[in-house]
Each structure stands twice: as structure tokens, then as C-alpha cells.
Image (cartoon, helix red, strand yellow):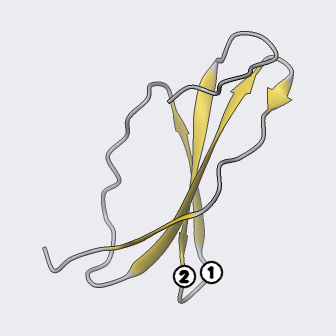
């Protein structure tokens, strides 16, 4: 969902995806409210967080969401 409070119109979103075991983080710019992550490893735990940004810069990120991928 879009932020409940925004300091101006939202221009986009940023998704941070961190592989828990290695600490390797990816940073993806997202235009809409959904995004499909591809190329993830099997049976691996990832930490996801999101933030919205506008012309004034990034907002506060969400709390971390922990997910684990399945086999295929």
C-alpha cells in the first residue's frame, strides 16, 4: 500500500532484498505497487524492506519482512 502520510506525491518505490546468510543486498527501483523478484536461490531466507520516495528524497522504510523460497 502507498504510505499513509507522504510529503508530496510518491514518485516511486525502492525494494531492498537481502540474502540473510550472506548479507548480500540488492536494491531495485519499482514504479508500481507490485514487483516480481526473479533469480532467487532455492530454500533460502531473504529479508525484504520497502520505501517510497518523492522529489524530497526517500521516506521511512517498512519493517523487515522475512521470507523463505521454496524448491522451484
Question: Quarter of the image holding residue 72?
Answer: bottom left
71 or 63, nearer to the observer: 63
Q: Is residue 38 above or below residue 56?
A: below
**How far across and down, in percent of the image, does residue 1 sit?**
50, 30
Q: Which residue is mark 2?
A: 20
Q: Which residue is mark 1?
A: 23
Judged from the image, the secondary structure of the residue bearing numbered disc 2 is loop
Q: State the residue at coordinates (32%, 77%).
A: 41
Mark 1: give few (<14), some (14-19) or many (20+) Cα within 10 Å.
few
Q: State the residue at coordinates (66%, 17%).
A: 10
Q: State the residue at coordinates (65%, 56%).
A: 63
> Are the residues flagged by discs 1 and 2 in contact, CB closer than 8 Å?
yes
Q: State the residue at coordinates (36%, 82%).
A: 44
**Alpha carbon distance from label 1 to label 2:** 5 Å
**How far across and down, in percent of the image, does residue 33 sit?**
43, 29
58 or 27, nearer to the observer: 58
Mark 2: give few (<14), some (14-19) or many (20+) Cα within 10 Å.
some
Q: Is residue 58 above or below residue 11?
A: below
Amino acid at each position: 500500500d502507498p504510505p499513509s502520510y507522504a510529503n508530496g506525491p510518491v514518485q516511486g518505490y525502492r525494494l531492498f532484498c537481502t540474502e540473510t546468510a550472506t548479507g548480500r543486498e540488492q536494491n531495485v527501483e519499482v514504479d508500481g505497487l507490485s514487483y516480481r523478484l526473479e533469480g532467487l536461490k532455492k530454500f533460502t531466507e531473504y529479508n525484504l524492506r520497502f520505501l517510497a520516495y518523492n522529489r524530497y528524497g526517500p521516506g521511512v522504510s517498512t519493517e523487515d519482512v522475512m521470507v523463505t523460497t521454496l524448491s522451484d
